[in-house]
Image (tube, rainbow, N blue to C red):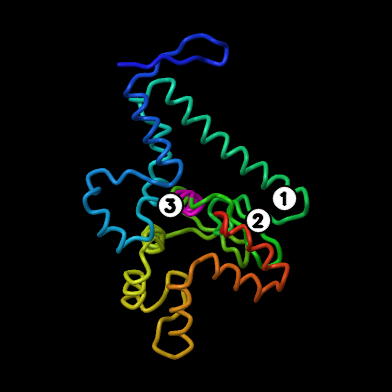
Amino acid sequence: ASGKGFNQDGSHTMQTIQDGKHLARWFNISTGRGDLGAAEPLAPLLANILFSPRLAAARLETPYELLRWDHSMRVKQHVVRDVAGTTMLGTTVLGLAAMAGVDVDLDPTSSDFGRMQIGNTRIDIWGGFQPLVRTFFRIAQQRRKSTGTGKSTDLSNEDLFNEFWSFWRNKLAPIPGFDADLLGGGTFTGDEINWEEENVKRELWNRFVPLMLQDLEEAYSEDGIRGAWLAVPSFFGTS
């Protein structure tokens, strides 16, 4: 079965039902609603274990959609156009920011890769792709750049495993994440976990207050009103 449409030049084009299904899948993935596949019946359970499992799945499935051999040329062009357009827009924003004097780290093994740094405030415009890309390059290149010293260090096999584990540990929902931190004796950022009053307050704030409010409070405490204004984009998807 197929449906008739028109190209921009007015010529006819045919879209099959399979094309429609693949495009619908891509629209879901590109807007953060990933396909859980065989784990679909477990979606309610996964939502209690992982922070937004469909979003995590969508970020992992995006590169796969670029490489799928069973897509028609029509679908492949649509996927490539969307990904290329988003990438070009993001790099253009970073380029203009760098020209304006904003610090932009281009080392893919750095925690600040692809982020704009203004004072102590960092702005991530990539919608959840940055940690995936950073982890991939750290494991592939077996090195990590320190944001503190700017120096790169080689990673051992244990370090590579810790990079992989930290990526997924950061995806855990608040309660499972807290359990993992208790078992590990600290958070994935290196903060110690204990039952002192200040520590408990910090953990309750970090795990149960919406992230955009955390960004706003942190930016204000570090850079005052300017930082607060810089944190406003987090309400629209940056971090």
Could you say whether the residue bearing mark 3 is in a helix, strand or loop? helix
> Is 126 displayed left or right of 18 in the figure?
right
Residue 116: mark: 2
Label 2 to label 1: alpha-carbon separation: 7 Å
Secondary structure that dominates the magenta span: helix
- Of callouts 2 and 3, the N-terminal one: 2
Q: Residues within 10 Å of mark 1 (few under 14, many from 20)?
A: some
Seen at 39% across and 18% down, the residue is 15
Q: Residue furthest bottom?
A: 197
Please determine whether, in this image, residue 209 is positioned above or below residue 151. below
Could you say whether the residue bearing mark 2 is in a helix, strand or loop? strand
Badge nearest the viewer, 2 or 3 = 2
Three-letter code, disc 2: Met
Q: Picture coordinates of residue 69 (x, y %)?
A: 35, 26
Please determine whether, in this image, residue 214 is positioned above or below residue 84. below
The part of the chain drawn in magenta is: 129-139
Give the quarter of the figure containing the N terminus. Answer: top left
Q: Which residue is mark 3?
A: 139
Three-letter code, disc 3: Ile
Q: Picture coordinates of residue 27 (x, y %)?
A: 43, 37
- Does any portion of residue 35 appear in the rendered image? yes
Report if the CB atoms under discs 2 and 1 are less than 8 Å apart.
Answer: yes
